Amino acid sequence: MERGNQVGNYHQLKAEEDGLSTEPFAPDGSPLFPLMETRLYKRRWLMLFVFGTFSMSNAFMWLQYSIISNIFVRFYGVDSICVDWLSMIYFLTYIPLILPVTWLLDNRGLRDVVVAGSAFNCIGAWIKTSTARPNMFAVTFLGQFVCSVGTVFLLGIPSRLASLWFGQQEVSTACSIGVLGNQVGIAIGFLLPPILVPNVDDVEELAYHIGVMFYITAGVATLIFILVVIVFQEKPELPPSQAQAQARSLSLDQYSYKASIGRLLCNKPFMLLVLTYGLNVGCFYAVSTLLNRMITEQYPGEEVNAGRIGLTIVIAGMVGSLICGIWMDKTKTYKQTTFAVYLLTFIGMLVYSFTLNLGHMWVVFLTAAILGFFMTGYLPLGFEFAVELTYPESEGTSSGLLNCSAQLFGIIFTISQGKIMDKWGTLAGNIFLCVFLLIGTILTGFIKSDLRRQNANASCDTQRGSVSIPVCVFLCVCVCVHCACWCLEEVGCPIAWLHTLWQSWSRHLIL
């Protein structure tokens, strides 16, 4: 364990928001805050792992229908838009429920919210086990709806978990790893359903394969629920940073949920970030939901490779998330990094759009990896930038508003792009997304960089020295790159020799 210094003196710190000051006061009117003992516990990584497994399970169920949408359209005898709604129900459920859930997060705490979300995830998975029959679409939709309620309980957790358990020099990395669990689930959701449910003509055989997938999903969700109930804790005994210590010093009487929402809505830089985050992540949701249609229209019969392309997008994004998180922990350049990644997301989407129909599958894999590195890598950047802009407001509330914007734009973009693809083709649908990514890039440049949390930590300056990034982060990067190289080899990519080079280099680093 690493232990901070216990300091007996007081440090002067200006309160950032009305109603959040404490006594006593200095002669100049500045409130005095005691410098408290801080401590980093090793079990913080266990909390992050447990939450990541829950997020992974839920994200897998989001995509298990849409990545093989053509199969489910034929199996249930419904239109493609009905299967798309099995994914979009996640977006729709989030919007009305996010404010009640963030209220629960602030009043009941992190553990109760995570346990409740894991329970909904488990119940929904078991409901779907009875729906491997062609006449059970309504019931499978009900199960997916219950799982989508679980999503409301988890999407705003990474930044909250990082702030409660991790020190100031690793909080962005921890948030990135928390988001990584969701991305791993999306990656598995792209990869496994095309393998577990092959596109066979016999309905009975197809029902058997779908049932196997549903029972595996339910079993994993049950194990994760048990793990969450037994292992997951609310917060450490001592705060990990002075910013968190100051947040703990506020009594419940000093905090008003309605007032907090009001302050966030009046925070112009944050509301601009809410808009730009929604545009970026909404595009990601649309691409993920409609990926099967994009690929199979250009490359008929390539359902498995459609899943592998989705896997490539997410694996590249996992690497991007980790790199961006580590970079921000080291440099604290939140706005500059966010703007650069947003701009490169727009460029990546352009390249992907205009190379999709070239007829070379390895080109699609390559451009999808570039797009995923920046588009998916943007997710934790938005969370952490929001926490900086809104400190000392609740991380769950700021993250919830970001995700609410993303879900809203996800519904709009998915429906709109689907209609455009039906009428004018895949390229027109992708250009539609590019336009909004360009708008988001321009608006990001106007966000004022007001790093309130960093200012609070810098004022106290009690944590000195660098914090080494755990070996698990490096291993995650290694696994991601190995998987990406495997996908390239599977489609005969002429640059697959990079796999051999990476193996040699990573082996040298480990030794």
Image (cartoon, helix red, strand yellow):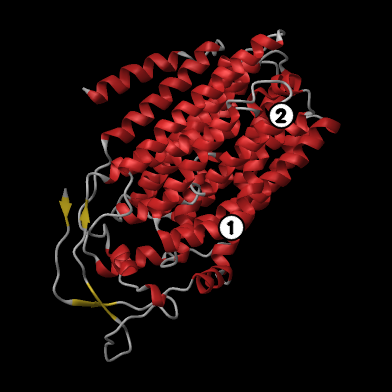
Look at the numbered disc 1 and give the secondary structure of its residue.
helix
Give the total number of marks visible in the rendering.
Answer: 2
Q: Is 354 located above or below residue 18 in the figure?
A: above
On the picture, is 184 further left or further right than 194? left
Q: Which residue ends up furthest to the right in the rendered image?
A: 423
**Category of crowding for the residue at label 1, using alpha-carbon neighbours closer than 10 angstroms: few (below 14), some (14–19), many (at least 20):** many
The residue at 14%/70% (across/down) is 7
Disc with the residue nearer the chain's start (1 vs 2) = 2
On the picture, is 345 further left or further right than 500? right
User: Which residue is labeled 1 in the image?
Assistant: 274
Look at the numbered disc 2 and give the secondary structure of its residue.
helix
Q: In this view of the protein, can residue 437 be seen by the observer? A: no
**Residue type indicated by callout 2:** Phe
**Category of crowding for the residue at label 2, using alpha-carbon neighbours closer than 10 angstroms: few (below 14), some (14–19), many (at least 20):** many
User: Which residue is labeled 2 in the image?
Assistant: 137
Residue 198: x and y in percent read 62, 12
The nearer-to-camera label among 1 and 2 is 2
The residue at 28%/66% (across/down) is 245
Q: Which mark is residue 231?
A: none
Residue 72: x and y in percent read 70, 23
In-front residue for pair 499/68: 68
**Quadrant for the C terminus in the image:** top left
Residue 48: x and y in percent read 35, 43
Residue 261: x and y in percent read 54, 68
Q: Disc 1 to disc 2, how far (Cα)? A: 35 Å
Q: Quadrant of residue 355?
A: top right
Q: In this view of the protein, can residue 179 be seen by the observer? A: yes
In-front residue for pair 248/476: 248
Q: Is 27 located above or below residue 346 in the figure?
A: below
**Residue type indicated by callout 1:** Val
